[in-house]
Amino acid sequence: MTGQLAGQVAIITGASRGIGRAIALLFAREGADIAFCHLHDAEGAAEVAAKVEALGRRAFHAAVDVAELPALRAFIAGAEAALGPCDVLVNNAGLNLRGAIETITEEMFDRVMSVHVRASFFAAQAVWPGMAARGRGRIITTASQLAFKGAPNIVPYCTAKAALVGMTRALAREGAPKGILVNAIAPGPVVSDLTAQLGPDWAERTGATLPLGRVGQPEEIAAAALLLASSPGGDFFVGATLSPNGGDVMH
Ligand SMILES: NC(=O)c1ccc[n+]([C@@H]2O[C@H](COP(=O)([O-])OP(=O)(O)OC[C@H]3O[C@@H](n4cnc5c(N)ncnc54)[C@H](O)[C@@H]3O)[C@@H](O)[C@H]2O)c1
């Protein structure tokens, strides 16, 4: 099917590469105009914007650290001024700061919580009144299967991702009566720049531990995001956490 998001506006945080990029390109192929931000990746952002425009859609992008709330709010206001009211918000920007518990500083912990949890909440808050007034909106947040599974040496990341699952459920209860459907995706291990930090044999090593025998591709997560963003596919999901994860965690 094509044109599932025809005429809609999607705002995606962190879409210059990886999963966010795949979501941006899939949503554009389905007819959405795309606003996105990135951190220190002007080259990747320009390439994604060019691809969106080559698909016949409009693109708006900005270099914004989502942890800086005035800049995040200005990005969302600028995106809506340029493209129109936000139909779909995808909270995707993320990073990971690793270390044994003894080495995690207050700054590291706060940074991971700010980029994932604070930014996702305040981005949702920024689009909320408009969505409520129009009686329709979708908010999709990228959690992780590590919210459920846990992992050593990334306690702040697992904490933040679990918080996002709880936040999604609370927002979903508040949003559903207003027509705002809030859901999350908890991907399993996916090939991206984030996981490339883990070494050249990471994909093979990690894939071997999964029931499916391989890690995922960003496009496989984007497909879940499209399901949640589209209608009728996403119409009955409220506070759900979809788990495209190769069987890493089953629930
Ligand atoms: N790759 C995986 O295995 C995996 C698994 C589960 C969840 N996730 C989550 O998926 C999301 C995307 O991950 P990815 O693997 O595509 O990562 P990636 O590093 O390839 O891309 C991250 C994107 O977010 C942007 N970004 C990072 N920090 C930002 C900030 N502070 N402000 C604005 N933009 C920022 C980057 O510029 C980039 O566009 C993250 O939330 C991540 O935690 C990834």
Image (cartoon, rainbow, N blue to C red):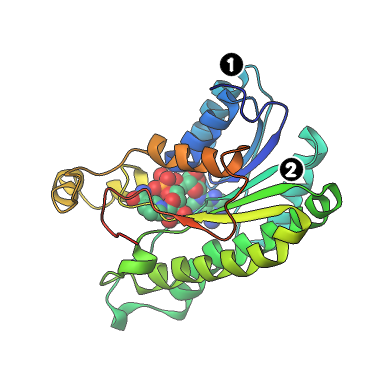
In the picture shown, does residue 147 fall above or below 23? Answer: below
Q: Is residue 16 visible?
A: no
Q: Nearer the viewer, residue 30 or 78?
A: 30
Residue bearing the label numbered 1: 54
The image quadrant of residue 79 is top right
Q: Are marks 1 and 2 in contact (CB under 8 Å)?
A: no
Q: Residue at x 35, y 42 (%)?
A: 192
* Residue type at the position of mark 1: Ala
Q: Nearer the viewer, residue 16 or 86?
A: 86
Residue bearing the label numbered 2: 86
* Residue type at the position of mark 2: Cys
Of pointers 1 and 2, the one earlier in the residue sequence: 1
| Secondary structure under the numbered disc 1 in the rendered image | helix
Q: Residue at x 39, y 53 (%)?
A: 243
Instruction: Using residue 192 as the reference point, say whether residue 222 is left or right of it.
Output: right
Q: Quadrant of the C terminus?
A: bottom left
| 10 Å crowding of disc 2: few (<14), some (14-19), many (20+) | many
Instruction: Using residue 171 as the reference point, say whether residue 127 is left or right of it.
Output: right
* Marks 1/2: CA–CA distance: 21 Å
Q: Tell which residue pokes out farthest to the bottom in this image.
A: 102
- The mark found on residue 222 in the picture is none
